[in-house]
Amino acid sequence: MEITASLLLQQLFVGLALGAIYVLVAVGLSLIFGLLGVVNFAHGAFYMLGAYVAVYVYGLTGSFWACLLLVPLAVGLLGLLAERWLIRPLYGRGVDYPLLLTFGLAYVLVDSVRMVWGVQGEAFATPEALRGAVDVGFGVFPLYRLFLIGLCAGLLLALWLFIEKTRLGLIIRAGARDPLVLKVLGIDVGRIWLLIFGLGTALAGLAGLLAAPLRGVNPEMGGSVLIEAFVITVIGGMGSLVGAIVAGLLVGVVVAMTTLFQPEFAELAIFALMAAVLILRPNGLFGKS
């Protein structure tokens, strides 16, 4: 196969689209860990659940745009319930308690999906309005992947404005540093943690919906993406949102480029990248000691 500049640009574009999905999953995971200190092993299951909720909603409405609205709301609501009734009683007992609980919760969610939809998986076609390709001047690229990159960029901008420019965002950042100060000021910290966990799981559910036309829908789809999300979080720096964004895009590009030259090493390349980063920067690209 002849490697041309056009082919490299197309594969780079594929990597950015894949990275956009990685970013949504990793940002949600990083939000929950960075602000709550919870290692959420159920994050991949929420991602998988987002894809199955999309299958259900699309079957009812026939609208992909309805899925974009309802899937994050449904998965985020489940995240709110999980935080309030399962995880919150474990705060202050050590990191291993919520870790083990979310590990078990992941199995419950996966088995529940198997009982409802079966183990064979479901098809989820690319929405008709986003099919086809677009000539952007230096290559022809699938419209759906362009949509993925644009949507991810818009969501990240909105998230940054929310955290950095709003009063609630200020409270969230303050609570991440010293929850006791918020309690002294009369602010209900529990509601803040509830919001963050719901937001993180909603992002995971949305990523599952967006990945469905590319990767298919099956009960095991959350397992691999959970590993990739943790690798991205480690590469970017534990708890760093900027690190999750940069590392997610970087991992997407590395996977795409490795697939072009040596497809059998695509998964290995992720861990090789993590090892290289940790050798040079033990706390990750944007992590702190």
Image: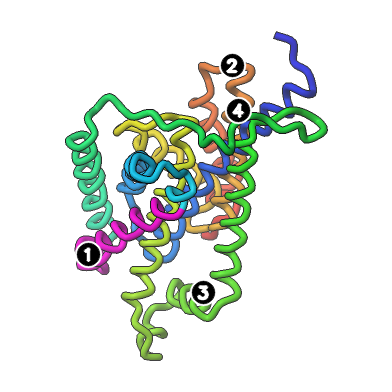
The image's mark for residue 231 is none
Circle nearer the viewer, 4 or 2: 4
Q: State the image quarter where residue 194 is shown.
A: bottom left
What residue is shown with label 4? 256
Q: What residue type is labelled 4?
A: Ala
| CA–CA distance in space, label 4 to label 2 | 10 Å
Q: What residue type is labelled 3?
A: Gly
Is tag 4's residue or tag 3's residue first in the polypeptide sequence?
3
| CA–CA distance in space, label 4 to label 1 | 40 Å
Q: Residue furthest top?
A: 1
The image's mark for residue 169 is 3
What residue is shown with label 2? 262
What residue is shown with label 1? 90
Q: Give the range drawn in magenta.
A: 69-92
Q: In this view, does 96 lie to the left or right of 207?
A: left
Is tag 1's residue or tag 3's residue first in the polypeptide sequence?
1
Q: Position of residue 181 (x, y in %)?
A: 41, 85
Is tag 2's residue or tag 1's residue first in the polypeptide sequence?
1
- Identified at 43% across, 66% down, the residue is 35
Q: What element carries label 3?
A: helix
- Identified at 60% across, 75% down, the residue is 165
Local packing at callout 4 (Cα closer than 10 Å; few below 14, some 14-19, many 20+) is many
